[in-house]
Amino acid sequence: MTSPIRILFLDLDDTLYPSSAGLWEAIGDRILSYMVDVVGVPGDRAPTLRDEYFRAYGTTLTGLRIHQAIDPLEYLHYVHDVPLERYLSPDPAARAILAATPLRRVVFTNSDRRHTDRVLARLGLTDVIDQIIDIIDLDWIPKPDEAAYMKAMALVGEPDPRACLLLDDLVRNLLPAERLGMTGVLVGRKDLSADTRIRIDSVRELPTVFQTLGVPFPQGAG
C-alpha cells in the first residue's frame, strides 16, 4: 500500500513562472558575464564551459566552485541581479491553486533564498509557500545529485519518498526523484521528448495532477 502524498516540492525558475517570461535567459546572460568579467574565462569559451559544468555538475556554480574556487555567495548575488519587474508579474490564478493545495508546499531550488524570496514576492506567492530549501540548505549539493533529494526530505521531516510530489521543468531533475520513489511532474514544454509520468504546462494545472493521483482537492478551488 502506497503512502499518501504529503509534500509538494516545487522547483522555482521556469516552474513557478513560464519559461517564456525570459527571466532565466537574463540570468544566463549574467552567468556568462560573471564567467568572463569576474573569473576571466575567454568570451568565446564561456558558453561552452557553462554548458559543460551544467551537464557535469547540475549547475554552473558547482563547476566554478570546483575548478575556479569562486565565492559562491558573490556569484549568486551577481547572477541574480536582474530587474524582476521586467519579466514577472503577480499570478493570482497560481496563488489560488497553491493556497488550496492540501499538501505542504516547499520550494526546492538550486538557487539561493534571496533570489527565491524576490521571485515569490514578485509573483505574489510568498504567503502560500510553507518552506524554502535553497542551495545553501542543500550544503551546495544541487539537483540532480541524489543527495540533494535526501537532504530535502530530511529538512521537511519526511522519511518516505513516496509521500513526495516534485514539480520541475527539467527531466534530469525528475529522474533521481522518481528513482527514489517520488512522483515527478514535468512543468512546461522544454522537454517534450522525455518520458515522464505526468506533464503540465503550468502550476495552475495542479488540480488535474491531484485528480490523476487521487489526492483530494477542494471543490471549486482554482
Image (cartoon, grey):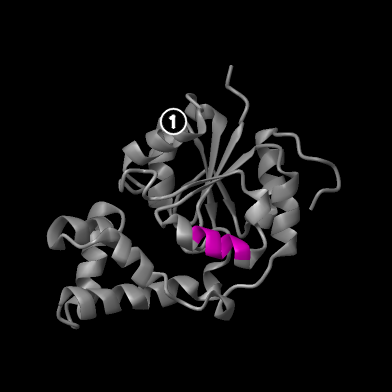
* Residue drawn 16% across the image and 55% down it: 66
Q: Is residue 188 visible?
A: no
Percent position of residue 133, x then y: 46, 45
Q: Main secondary structure of the magenta part?
A: helix
Percent position of residue 85, x then y: 58, 77
Task: Please state if 138 lies on the left or on the right of 218 as rendered.
Answer: left
Q: Where's the N terminus, which quadrant?
A: top right
Q: Is residue 70 visible?
A: yes
Q: Nearer the viewer, residue 165 or 100?
A: 100
Q: Nearer the viewer, residue 80 or 23?
A: 80
Three-letter amino acid code at the position of disc 1: Ala
Determine the residue located farthest toward the top in the rendered image: 1
The residue range painted magenta reads 116-121
Q: Nearer the viewer, residue 165 or 79?
A: 79
Which residue was labeled with disc 1? 154
Q: Is residue 36 magenta?
A: no
* Residue drawn 79% across the image and 53% down it: 222
* Whether residue 107 is situated above or below residue 89 in the rendered picture: above
Quadrant of the rendered structure where residue 122 is? bottom right
**Could you classify mark 1 by the number of other residues whose Cα lies within 10 Å: few (under 14), some (14-19), or many (20 or more)?**
few
Tell how many labels: 1
* Whether residue 178 is situated above or below residue 195 in the rendered picture: above
Task: Please state if 71 lies on the left or on the right of 18 as rendered.
Answer: left
* Residue drawn 43% across the image and 77% down it: 26
Determine the residue located farthest toward the right in the rendered image: 220
Q: Nearer the viewer, residue 26 or 78?
A: 78
* Residue drawn 39% across the image and 33% down it: 150
Query: Disc 1 on helix, strand or loop?
Result: helix
Percent position of residue 184, x then y: 51, 42
